[in-house]
Image: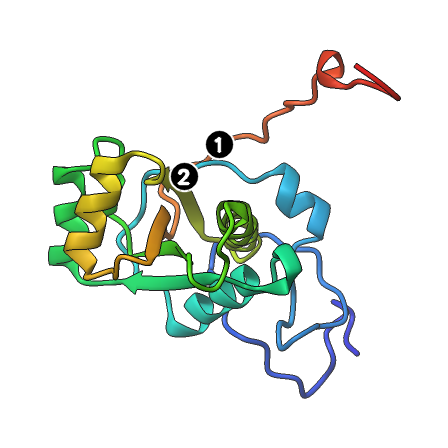
Amino acid sequence: MNDDGVRIGFTPAPLAPNVKLRLHEPPFGLGAIMEAMEAIMTRRSIRRYTGEQVSPELERKLLEAGMAAPSASNRQPWHFIVVRSRETLDRVPEFHRYSKMLREASLAVVVCGDNEVQTTDFWAQDCSAATENMLVAANALGLGAVWLGVHPNEETVRKTRELLGIPGHVTPLCIVSVGYPAEEKPPGDRYDESRVHREKW
């Protein structure tokens, strides 16, 4: 173990060059990760990117985080479509008015729910948990990301299905835009005691 808390002789997975981390014993192949609460509390929606490509290794880490989410009855109804094609990314803003940042993104992950695996509406909660995991993981890895809603807008769902060839029993919940951040946002303090109800409303 060296002075930074990293095992000597251990080769960590590559992290984003701009990431600022607290180092400790490397779990799951990462030599250094941001503390969990720090990653949650400093996460912001990032819509501007440098154009640098996100490595396949970091892409895998995001997907692992997504699939680590809880799901009703552990059905894990999610599917993830990773889109790197510049042509495809550029087409999404033609029908999704809030997705212009995809023209600068390194990649997008379309989070989908399989209605044959999870036959109740809980698929949306399951896939939302997976999405938030990926957003927090992106921040911890020094990447920027933003959640772009698709479901329940029927027109956006239909056009996303058409663009990506998604079968009828699978519903796209959202698109996660990912890249190296070209903007910095300070942490937001969103705690509101008036929204907390104790024992009853």
The residue carrying mark 1 is 185
Residue 100 appearing in the image: no
Say which residue appears at 44% left-offset and 74% top-offset: 57
Figure quadrant of the C terminus? top right
88 vs 128, left or right, is left
Q: Secondary structure at mark 2?
A: loop
Amino acid type at mark 2: Ile
197 vs 109, left or right, is right
How many callouts does the rendering have?
A: 2
The residue carrying mark 2 is 46
Is 97 drawn above or below residue 136 in the view shown?
Answer: above
129 vs 93, left or right, is right
Say which residue appears at 84% left-offset and 18% top-offset: 200
Calculate the distance from the C-alpha at mark 2 to the C-alpha at mark 1.
8 Å
Q: Pointers 2 and 1 in contact (CB under 8 A)?
A: yes
Closer to the eye: label 2 or 1: 2
